[in-house]
Image (cartoon, rainbow, N blue to C red):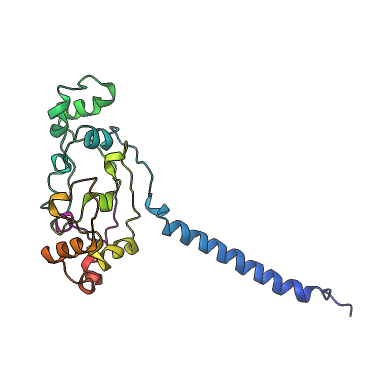
Amino acid sequence: MAQLFPKSANYLAPASIAALVLVAGGAVGSLLALDYAGFNQRRGETVEQTVPFSHEHHVAGLGIDCRYCHTSVEKSAVAGIPPTSTCYNCHKIVWNEAPMLEPVRSSYRTGQPIEWNKVHDLPDFAYFNHSIHVAKGIGCASCHGPVDQMRLMRSAESLQMRWCLECHRNPEKFIRPKEEVFNMNWKAKDQETLGRARRKYKVRPPAEITSCGTCHR
């Protein structure tokens, strides 16, 4: 009986298998790289909003403190979205006829809240409390990035578990004096100062704050 396959098939089969493994490995590696970069978490992506609110203008330009709008950030798990009345405190006087602020005026007239789209959207299985982080000296910019430079809000970090653990394993690198928590321009001075702040605020040891139950309840 004539031979069905040429002798070269002996080399072609393993080469094909090796190529398939390399292609599959490359595809998986690419997906992991995208995930590691925060692509799946919309890192760096500007989220479209009903009103194009500019943190750059309000924070850097006008010097408005974070707590003026995010009133519950020091006492609640959530920072809070300001009611329309907070916006209207100023905009009933300034830019009170600007077309792009019509949703604000309409919301104030009707009592219907403005629908804001989430920028930082943690999964339901992850527990995060703003108040405890503020109480322990973690600044807004550590998680939200330089919001005073953002014309439109975007996610500056991936907010993945590995990113959170970087801080929980070495919290002294990120802790700042409490009076500087809302200062977007604060810079760490030295490790000794940071170490004292950690002891002052009684931050628990890394072994405790990296346990699964800390964030998954």
Residue at the spot 46% in from the left edge and 62% down from the top edge: 32
Is residue 123 depicted above or below 10 in this figure? above
Chain part drawn in magenta: 120-134
Q: Nearer the viewer, residue 161 or 60?
A: 60
Residue 21's spot in the image, x, y percent? 61, 69
Is residue 66 depicted above or below 217 in this figure? above
Residue 194's spot in the image, x, y percent? 20, 61
Residue 125 shown in magenta: yes
Task: Please give left or right for residue 131 compared with residue 6 in the image.
Answer: left
Q: Nearer the viewer, residue 151 or 112?
A: 151
- Quarter of the view holding residue 71: top left
Residue at the spot 13% in from the left edge and 32% down from the top edge: 85
Whether residue 217 appears in this view of the structure is no
Residue 106's spot in the image, x, y percent? 20, 26
Residue 131 shown in magenta: yes
Task: Please give left or right for residue 8 compared with residue 52 in the image.
Answer: right
Task: Please give left or right for residue 183 compared with residue 9 in the image.
Answer: left
Looking at the rendering, in which quadrant would you find the N terminus?
bottom right
Secondary structure mainly formed by the magenta segment: loop
Check the image and name the residue furthest to the right. Answer: 2
Residue 192's spot in the image, x, y percent? 20, 64
Is residue 207 depicted above or below 120 in this figure? below
Is residue 48 depicted above or below 106 in this figure? below
